[in-house]
Image (cartoon, grey):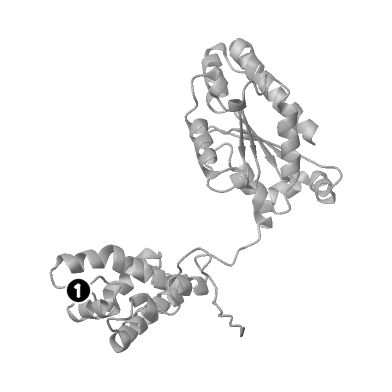
Amino acid sequence: MVTAAREITLVHARFRADIATNPVDVAAECALPPSDAPRVAQAATRWYEVHTTYGLRIDELDNYVRDISEYPELVATEANISRITSDVGFLNIRTDLERLENSPADPEERIRILAATRAISHGVDVSRLGIMTVMGMPNQAAELIQASARVGRNEPGLVFCLINPMRDRDTSAFRWFAKWASYLDRLVHKVPVNRESLPVLQRVLPGGLMAWLYQKHEHDWLASGRGHKKLRQSHAVVAALNAGAIDESTLIDELRDGFGIDPADPRFRRHAQEIETFVHETVRQARLNADSNRTMPDLLDPRPPMSLRDVGMSIELRAEL
């Protein structure tokens, strides 16, 4: 499979070399008139210069990189190859992404080969990526969709799926590839986090409320001259409520708009009711329990998450020493 990936990369490099030396003949091979030769040459440099190889396993990707490094027409300098894997530093990845999007004029500094793992699957939106080789079939259809979506973002992309005959899943995909590809979207497992999930809305409402208080109402409250404490303090929120600077109906409307909840849509009727209940209960708790020693997040249940890992119930472990 590594050898096949190398051969595809070599063919691609030779194809680009042919375009650079004689774009008219290449245009003719593609059934295009001679007048389109400049466009073919431009496309080969802009959209199809970089060959992306996606590896399921880091050792296979390492073998591929070691293999192609022996071919000067592929990798003339170290700058011609880039890696996006979990063991590469963020700053290095960001620098290479900038070089991909804004390719240097010096050929020795241009990235020709991009070797990547699933680290490329999310957040890498480079318009210049147009050709990819996938070494092996991922276990999840979503991974193949995410990986292959990195190419062809502005112009049509080409993806080669290499089959490992030693893996049963790969041979099955090869046998039924046309049917399997046509149903690819339906094979994606649904995730529990989606905008129609009521528990998800319940979890994010406290953070949404504090975002509105911090980013909008706090500025207006302090600028009005009536408030001297930031709205993180629970007694300051009660003061703003009593002064009419904040009211329940406004908070309800802001949370509905912020989370895209249309109360007229039957799908979101329960979501709209959940927002109303949350705001009414929050205001009630603030009026009952607010004091100068308690922050507003202390009164919210659940508390706004402090990090992306703060999504579950916390437990306290005690030990007698």
Q: Residue at x 55, y 80 (%)?
A: 316
Q: Quadrant of the N terminus?
A: top right
Image side of residue 232 versus residue 221, left or right: right
Query: Is residue 49 in view from this perspective?
Result: no
Q: How many marks?
A: 1
Element type where label 1 sits in the image:
loop
Observer-nearest of 17 and 227? 227
Q: Residue at x 73, y 45 (%)?
A: 57
Q: Residues within 10 Å of mark 1 (few under 14, many from 20)?
A: some
**Quarter of the rendering containing residue 14:** top right
Image side of residue 98 versus residue 281, left or right: right
Query: Is residue 77 in view from this perspective?
Result: yes
Type of amino acid at the residue the image marks with label 1: Ala
Vertical side of 144 occupied by 70: above or below: above
Residue extending furthest front?
A: 321
Image coordinates of residue 195 in percent, x first then y, are 49, 65
Q: Residue at x 45, y 77 (%)?
A: 302
Image coordinates of residue 193 in percent, x first then y, are 55, 65
Image coordinates of residue 233 in percent, x first then y, are 29, 75
**Quarter of the rendering containing residue 306:** bottom left
Q: Quadrant of the C terminus?
A: bottom right
Q: Which residue is mark 1?
A: 245
Image coordinates of residue 175 in percent, x first then y, are 83, 45
Image side of residue 45 versus residue 226, left or right: right
